[in-house]
Image: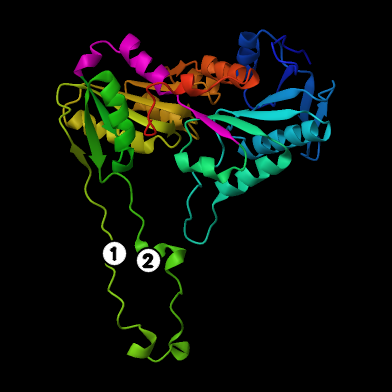
Amino acid sequence: MSTVSTGTKCPMIVVAGNSHTELANSIAKRLGTRLGDASVYHKTNRETTVEIKESVRGKDVYIIQTGTKDVNNDIMELLILAYACKTSSARNIIGVIPYLPYSKQSKMRKRGSIVCKLLATMLGRSGLTHIITMDLHQKEIQAFFDVPVDNLRASPFLVDYVKEFIPDYRNAVIVARNPNSVKRASSYAERLRLSIAVIHGEEKIEELGCDGRNSPPPLPEDEQLPRNHEFGIETLPTILAKEKPPLNVVGDVGGRIAIIVDDMIDDVLLFVKTAEALKERGAYKVYVMATHGLLSSDAPRLIEDSCIDEVVVTNTVPHEAQKMQCHKIKTVDVSVMLVEAIRRIHHRESMSYLFRNIGVDD
């Protein structure tokens, strides 16, 4: 491992797992150092093994690891790296996790669990003392952690991309893919001085009766309690099942460029359907912009065959293989933001500079 000469007494060491070596090398290069001498590999029985080949005693260790399609291996590599540094007496262990895995599972669904909370607990117990991430799926996820979390934003990079690479962007409209994304779309629209449109009725709405929290389930007839007012059964209001509304575009997109904004692109089928609806309403170009480009399964083929003109994502998640299959995918480099966050944390400087003109709705 190499160290960075800084004004602090404690040297910095940067190590990385196998999830995104290209981003890790870019960060190390911008910091003026090289990646530390740590070996992370899998044995023949699929167990993850970590070997840190230089001393980390009393040093600040920055572990660069993001979530990919091989998500469970990514998590285990991060946990074992952090624990190895902890047991080797590192002073601080900072996890640089551009895309936090399992962030979509941050709410209770049916009889499942809040997996993101479990992951947050595991990361804290493994030895991490600070976490740097980017565009959490839900801002409330920060409260799952018992260690400080800096949730950086990629929106300034995406806004700059719109201004620089989308011709006639003044004739564009920012589109929220569903009503829950209106605040994010409004934040983009206000900085670009554009109007917004909202897609309504696109996704299936979960029926209230399917939620496990509405238990107990019905009992067999021979075990049912007497239906009388003493038990309060007949006083409950009747809950009608929700019906999926038809797909509708709220706002004027005719003769304009439609820019759909979201925090991640994974299953692109819904984005394709949204793009088709926008084209039917008169939009002559459709762009999709998001921070995390997971692009799972056959997403590149679907994008290539769709009416979407361009998909713009950042390099928080590796997607070089997907770009080879689809020429419509473009990448925005956000490594400079992660580097500046690392530098400021290491020098004990304020992080507020990285959140200038950034709202909680981004």
Residue 48: horizontal and vertical position, in percent? 77, 36
Q: Is residue 328 visible?
A: no
Determine contact: label 1, label 2, CB under 8 Å: yes
Q: Is residue 235 visible?
A: yes
For residue 261, what is the image quadrant? Answer: top left
In the picture, which quadrant includes the N terminus? top right
Q: Which mark is residue 241?
A: 1
299 and 36: which one is in front? 36
Check if residue 155 falls in the magenta segment. Answer: yes
Residue 118: horizontal and vertical position, in percent? 61, 49
For residue 59, what is the image quadrant? Answer: top right
> Is residue 309 shown left or right of residue 94?
left
Residue beneath disc 2: 209
> Is residue 59 shown left or right of residue 179?
right
Q: Is residue 64 above or below residue 335?
A: below
> Is residue 318 shown left or right of residue 216?
right
Write the start and end of the magenta stretch as one range. Answer: 148-171
For residue 180, what is the image quadrant? Answer: top left
